[in-house]
Every structure is written in structure tokens, then in C-alpha cells.
Image (cartoon, grey):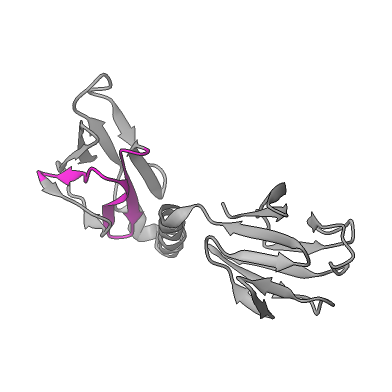
Amino acid sequence: MPKMIVSIDGVVIKEVQLTKDRTTLGRRPYNDIVIDNLAVSGEHAVMQMSGVDVFLEDLNSTNGTYVNGKAIKKQQLQNGDTVEIGKYKIKFVHEGATDNYEKTMVINAGAVVEAGESQNAALGNAAIKVMSGTAAGREVPLVKVVTTIGKPGVAVAAITRRPHGYVVALVEGTLKPTINGNPIGTDAVHLHHGDLLELAGTQMQFVQH
């Protein structure tokens, strides 16, 4: 989830998560991010979220809105950008490409599933059966559009349901998961009944009922 970290003279004074489609910033108390300083206009700027993208727009403020030292009217924010308003610096933090990748997958897959529920019903029920470790024999049904498996920091893969079947791809991690002994990366690979997955030292089997 994207967030704004507000600081002055290197001291962080507030951190705001961007959860709404529109987040306003200004001196007046009804703004989502209130900066009580005369250099800041009553309604100074607005951040608009569109999917995983965040756009910053200056609302004709008196002293202007700057991103990385340049005055802007409207600009898409990138992870690590610094917004300057008066003496305040606001760092934009978006929690990495993995998040973007997963959100994009969820949005795209979700849209496809809604468009093709009738085809989707033909897929039947699928599950991941754990073959090794303490949870051996346990089946995890794939009921969501995107199911993530693995250990954060080691290896995480996402299994995504699509109208024509299930695909798996690496989301994060240094250890690449394998399907039937073949390593997989961030490109989606189709799953077939009986495929053996190995991820972070755990063996699993993809089964369709």
C-alpha cells in the first residue's frame, strides 16, 4: 500500500497510508493530510489513485508543488519520489514491484474471471496437496483468484485462476520454485493435473478434481 512520509528539516512528523481514491493535502483541517504552515495553501494538492498508480496534482496553490525539485501541475509518483511543499518534504513510498505485480495479477485475473464465469465453472475444483514436511497430505483448495504460497523472504509464488486454467509464477525470492524439476520465474506457467511443485524446500502437487 502506498504511503506518504512527511518531514521537515529531516525530522519525520507524520506517515499517511494512501487508502482512498482521492487524498487531499493542505493547510485547512478538513484535508486528509493537514500541514499547518502559511507556505501551504488551504487546498494545496491532491493525490489520486488509479489501480496501483498514484498521481499528484497541484490545486493552483500559491507556492506550488515540487517533485524531486521540479514544479509540477500533475505527475505520476514513483517509489522514492520526494514531494516538496514549502519547507516540508514528503517522501512517496510504494512497497515494491512485488506488490505491484500481485495487485496487477489480481486486478487482471479478477476482470477475466468476472467476464467468464461460465467458462470458469468448467475448471472444476483445484487444490495444492502438500507432499512433504509437517503438513504432508494436507490439501489447500484454490478458492481465490490468486493464491500465494511459500515463505516471504525465501520464495513466494502466486497461483492465479484464469478462464482457461491455472497458472503459477514467482512473486519474490532468490530460490526459484520448480515444476516437475524445471525452474520457473516471473513469467506465468500453466499448471496441469499432477504437476509437482517444489518451493522453499516443500513439495506440493497440483490436483484438479
Residue 32: percent from the left, percent from the top? 78, 56
- Front-lying residue, 144 or 174: 174
Residue 190: percent from the left, percent from the top? 21, 55
Which quarter of the rendered picture does the C terminus lie within? Answer: top left
Q: Residue at x 21, y 50 (%)?
A: 191
Residue 159: percent from the left, percent from the top? 32, 48
Find the magenta span and give its range. Answer: 152-181
Residue 21 relative to residue 202: left or right: right
Q: Residue at x 69, y 60 (%)?
A: 89
Position above or below: 209 against 192: above
Residue 48 relative to residue 179: left or right: right
Q: Residue at x 89, y 56 (%)?
A: 29
Main SS, magenta region, reads: strand
Residue 23 relative to residue 31: left or right: left
Position above or below: 192 against 28: above
Residue 102: percent from the left, percent from the top? 42, 54
Q: Residue at x 33, y 57 (%)?
A: 162
Q: Is residue 162 magenta?
A: yes
Residue 205 appears in the figure: yes
Q: Is residue 205 magenta?
A: no
Position above or below: 15 against 68: above
Residue 78 relative to residue 144: left or right: right
Quarter-of-image position of residue 148: top left
- Front-lying residue, 4 or 46: 4
Count numbered badges in the picture: 0
